[in-house]
């Protein structure tokens, strides 16, 4: 499941991905995940952040997220 | 950190809790977590679900959540 999620967003914790997607991309991602997951064993929770990430998220401590909208300093 | 979160909501995955709280309770929870976490090692991400859980969440597969607003059948 992680491999599929990586194509749509960034891993921010072990089993947590943040994906900036359109509704169509979300439906596509959800369909792909449902095809490969084991409904008896796996647990998938998709939270749609109405109002966007900036408004919803409060992040503290170690942060793996890279904001590609900001200038990247290498 | 898990012990603190358990007082405010339910664990739905290994490192994921869902908490139905007021804004004041959220500030309280966040302050408690910040007091005990190691900012260098730990990662805390709080997502405020504007519009509520029912609108935001798409859950599939194994689901540990118990809806205490619904009748409990034991």
Image (cartoon, coloured by chain):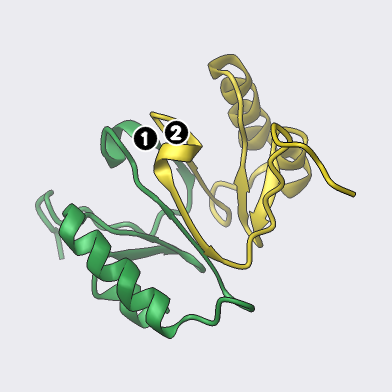
Chain colours: A yellow, B green
Question: Do marks 1 and 2 share a subunit?
Answer: no
Which residue in the protein does label 1 denote?
Answer: B56
Crowd rating for badge 2 (residues with CA inside 10 Å; few <14, some 14–19, many 20+): many
User: Could you classify mark 1 by the number of other residues whose Cα lies within 10 Å: few (under 14), some (14-19), or many (20 or more)?
Assistant: some
Report, in whole angstroms, how far the alpha carbon at label 1 lies from the one at label 2: 5 Å
Horizontal and vertical percent for residue A40? 54, 53
Camera-nearest residue between A21 and B26: B26
Q: Residue A48 carries which label?
A: 2
Q: Residue furthest top?
A: A24
Horizontal side, residue B44 vs residue A31: left or right? left
Do callouts 1 and 2 mark residues in contact (Cβ within 8 Å)? yes
Look at 77% across and 34% down and name the residue there.
A7
Pick the front one: B69 or A17: A17
Residue A73 x, y percent position in the rendering: 84, 46
Q: What numbered label is drawn on residue A58?
A: none
The image shows residue A65, relative to residue B14, as above or below, that is above
Residue depicted at 62% across the width and 36% down the height: A19
Left/right of residue B19 with respect to residue B57 in the rendered view: left
Q: In this view, does A47 lie above or below B66?
A: above
């Amino acid at each position: 499941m992680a491999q599929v999620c990586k194509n749509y967003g960034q891993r921010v914790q072990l089993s947590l991905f943040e994906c900036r997607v359109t509704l169509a991309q979300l439906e596509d991602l959800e369909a792909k995940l449902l095809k490969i997951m084991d409904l008896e064993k796996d647990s998938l929770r998709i939270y749609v952040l109405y109002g966007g990430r900036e408004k919803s998220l409060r992040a503290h401590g170690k942060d793996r997220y890279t904001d590609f909208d900001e200038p990247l300093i290498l």
